[in-house]
Image: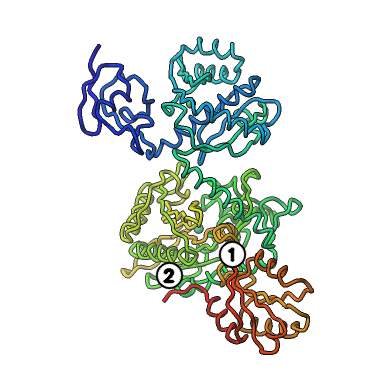
Amino acid sequence: MSNLNLNISGNQFDVSDGTSAAEAFKLAKLPAKGPQRPVAARLNGRMIDLSAPIHESGDLTVVDQNDPEALDLLRHSVAHIMAEAVEALFPEVKVTIGPAIENGFYYDFDKPEPFTPEDLVSIEEKMREIIKKGEPFARSEMSAAEAIEFFKNKNEDYKVELIEDLVRDQKADCVSIYKSGNFVDLCRGPHIPDTSWGAAFKLLSVAGAYWRGDEHRPMLQRIYGTAFFNGKDLQQHLHMLEEAKRRDHRRLGKDLDLFSISDEVGGGLIIWHPKGALLRVTLEEFERQEHLRRGYDIVMGPQILRAELWKKSGHWDNYRDNMYFTEVDGQGYGIKPMNCLAHMFIYRAQLRSFRDLPLRFFELGTVQRHEKSGVLHGLTRVRQFTQDDAHLFCTPENVDQEIKGVLDLVTDLMGAFGFEYEIELSTRPEKSIGSDEAWEMATTALKKALADKNVPYEINEGDGAFYGPKIDVKLKDALGRRWQCSTIQCDFTLPERFDLTYVDNDGQKKRPVMLHRTIFGSIERFVGILTEHFAGAFPMWLAPEQVRILTVTSRADDFAGEARAKLRKAGIRAEADLRNEKLGYKIREGQLQKVPFMLVLGDKEVETGSVAVRRRGGEDMGVMPLSDFIELARKEAEQPHWD
Ligand SMILES: [Zn+2]
Ligand SMILES: [Zn+2]
């Protein structure tokens, strides 16, 4: 037998051909316990099972539970364990596939009736039995013909179809099979060493799914689950799922009467109710003021623009499928999916000198985009939304400074809501316009600004806009979930296509650079994110209803009306609950509506012109003169601001 040479953590080991990764790690005296205990191995960059015999020399590294790919490997393996349990409990079921997905795994089964919640409980129980046994995952290879015969005998038609596809599409003559306990599956692997690794799992839900996502193929029964390397991580994740359910903006939007969506009106179209509209307008006004303060001009463009313009801009070629078109007086028009075009016409309305630049045009621009009905989701995926959009026109010399100004704005505005964020730089996509040189310049400009600001970022290859590379800001909400909001795009191409110029200090006509940027992105989506982030308990300055006055007796009605008028005069959004209901009931309702302050008025308060103050969350702030409370409320309602 020939000898192989393996490099394990910088040390060389001579081993005989066919040695397993597990044996090699033992030889290298690597930890067999704790978080560095190997789950699998990587041989020359390729993941393999710990038990896999090694037939080539090279680098052998440990894949432990902290490896970025380890969790997927574990979750996919637990899908095998689930399939083994299902097969044991429901022998008539046919198995299909069971991949790891974001946050978990699923397995699709061909079964006439859906799985019930009781089924899930017994499947979990069976899985625990299998896990306790610590059955090893054993890999073997079979010729394709043999494997087809094998699965045909087991009546596993879906597996047979998969192997036949492998033979046809990849000319496979041999396939790999994994056996754990009584369960045999066609699979590429690798897997966890044995079933005992899968202990921290939970089955979550069931759903119907077509075989291969094709509605003409059989409907299968899917079970979703999740798994982690330890119980603590699992508990944390389950808690997060509970929290996410509690904070779901679609539910809160209904409970707090913020917005609705109606099939009669149309999918993905938001109907803003008074409180939701007030919340939205507050956000928009805050942004308008902040933009004016930072040297932006407010502009507005039309909803429809001539179709020729969309052809010229490249939207026709690259974005047509997401657009709506209409005809007016025999002329074709496109309903705007973006706000860029009108802003270029504002630029072009005058002869521009280098002294005029940068110009920063800001528009709360409502756009229409055709999204497939299947992806529509509450406020976060809609068909009509308003962007906090701006286009900055600058000289090549001041691009850098402008990008940094936008990054500062992102930091300030996101900080105002307590969001942290991460940054990605997206590069040229397949469908794009503009020269290689322009793309290179634009990408370099964005990189330089990020480097100068000392902002860490990741590169997202091929995910840029069709007219330029972009910086994407992903913010992290209170549950640690990531949301894409702000973008900054650097564009040398549209100024070219629309012949935008400025006169430079040498008297020459030159092209300005155009930056496209949004901060919140879509206001609709941002309201959805804020609702979940704050679980509906908006900060005082954003809360649509800031103060609710509760009367204990009808003798307090007049004073309640007076207090509400004074609060409103002071700019505080106040309501009064004068109903003849028990105080406890009124307080409970105010709490459910997450009103920041409740004022309780009885005979004593009427007599002394004072109010008993309760904060959202239950804190009793005692009795104080109405004028003192108005002062306090005004201070708390102040918008975030920067000097
Ligand atoms: Zn597998
Ligand atoms: Zn734009």
User: Residue 410: percent from the left, percent from the top?
Assistant: 44, 63
| Residue count near mark 2 (Cα–Cα under 10 Å), binned few <14, some 14–19, many ≥20 | some
Q: Amino acid at mark 2?
A: Arg
Measuring 47% from the left and 18% from the top, which residue is drawn there?
177
Measuring 49% from the left and 13% from the top, which residue is drawn there?
144
Q: Quadrant of residue 511?
A: bottom left
Marking on residue 435: none
User: Residue 558: percent from the left, percent from the top?
Assistant: 75, 85
Measuring 77% from the left and 71% from the top, which residue is drawn there?
581
Q: Nearer the viewer, residue 517 or 594?
A: 594
- Write down the residue under mark 2: 352
Quadrant of the snapshot with the C terminus: bottom left
Horizontal relation, residue 15 to residue 635: left or right: left
> SS at mark 2?
loop
Horizontal relation, residue 167 to residue 328: left or right: left
User: Residue 108: percent from the left, percent from the top?
Assistant: 60, 29
- Write down the residue under mark 1: 537
Give the mark nearer the N terminus: 1 vs 2: 2
User: Residue 538: percent from the left, percent from the top?
Assistant: 58, 66
Q: Nearer the viewer, residue 355 or 247?
A: 247
Q: Nearer the viewer, residue 636 or 298?
A: 636
Q: Amino acid at mark 1?
A: Ala
Horizontal relation, residue 585 to residue 428: left or right: right
Q: In the rendered view, tell whether residue 388 sits above or below residue 182.
A: below
Using the numbered discs, state the Cα–Cα distance from disc 1 to disc 2 in whole angstroms. Answer: 47 Å
| Residue count near mark 1 (Cα–Cα under 10 Å), binned few <14, some 14–19, many ≥20 | many
> SS at mark 1?
loop
Q: Nearer the viewer, residue 205 or 96?
A: 205
